[in-house]
Image (cartoon, rainbow, N blue to C red):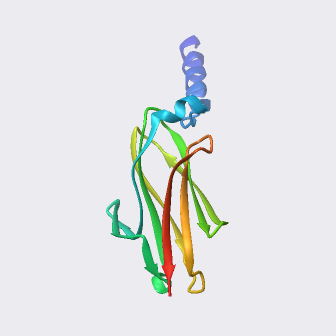
């Protein structure tokens, strides 16, 4: 009987332990996060960027921001913030679940959104790790 109760207790503890807990990173630990690759591209195929560029036609439809992150902490969360001019157009939180992780976000580009764009890649504490500039042309 004691064994059965002990087994149920251990099983209950295992079920209630969270399996995913993001690591809180403070400013001094941000140096342990490195952006290895950050590009704007037309597509992502087999976890690799396709048709990388810094200028795209207004008819492009959708663009992707692809990043490869190296971190001594995992799991963490980074953020891609898409800007048209100085106006924030999208903010996407992305999980980084191992020490080397590829991830991406996408944004639909409307044909009227001609001009300068950029995507900021943010650390878990909101520090800009990298900023990617690109243009949408007529």
Name the residue at the top extreme.
2
Quarter of image, res 117: bottom right
Residue 86, image x and y in percent?
A: 66, 66
Image: 121 above or below 24: below
Q: Is residue 25 visible?
A: no
Between 59 and 96, the residue placed more toward the observer is: 59
Along the line of sight, the residue nearer the viewer: 122 or 20: 122
Vertical comparison of 51 with 93: above or below: below
Residue in view at x 49 percent, y 64 percent: 133
In the rendered image, residue 63, in percent from the top left (x then y), is placed at: 47, 72
Nearer-the-camera pick, 95 or 122? 122
Q: Residue, x 58% and y 82% (percent of image)? A: 110
Locate residue 40 relative to residue 93 in the image: left or right.
left
Q: Residue at x 50, y 38 (%)?
A: 75
**From the image, which quarter does the N terminus lie in?**
top right
Write down the quadrant of residue 40 in the picture.
bottom left
Left or right, 29 with respect to 66, comes to right
Q: Residue 104: x and y, percent?
A: 46, 59
Residue 23 visible in the displayed image: yes
Asked whether 136 or 18 is in front, the reply is 136
Count of numbered labels shown in the rendering: 0
Residue at horizontal 33%, vertical 69%?
A: 50
């Amino acid at each position: 009987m004691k064994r059965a109760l002990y087994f149920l207790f251990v099983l209950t503890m295992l079920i209630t332990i969270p399996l995913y807990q993001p690591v809180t990173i403070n400013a001094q630990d941000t140096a342990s996060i490195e952006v290895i690759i950050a590009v704007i591209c037309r597509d992502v195929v087999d976890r690799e960027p396709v048709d990388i560029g810094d200028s795209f036609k207004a008819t492009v439809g959708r663009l992707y921001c692809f990043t490869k992150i190296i971190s001594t902490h995992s799991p963490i969360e980074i953020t891609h913030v898409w800007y048209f001019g100085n106006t924030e157009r999208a903010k996407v939180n992305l999980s980084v679940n191992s020490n080397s992780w590829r991830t991406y976000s996408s944004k639909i580009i409307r044909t009227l959104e001609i001009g300068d764009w950029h995507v900021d890649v943010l650390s878990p504490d909101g520090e800009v790790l990298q900023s990617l500039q690109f243009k949408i042309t007529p």
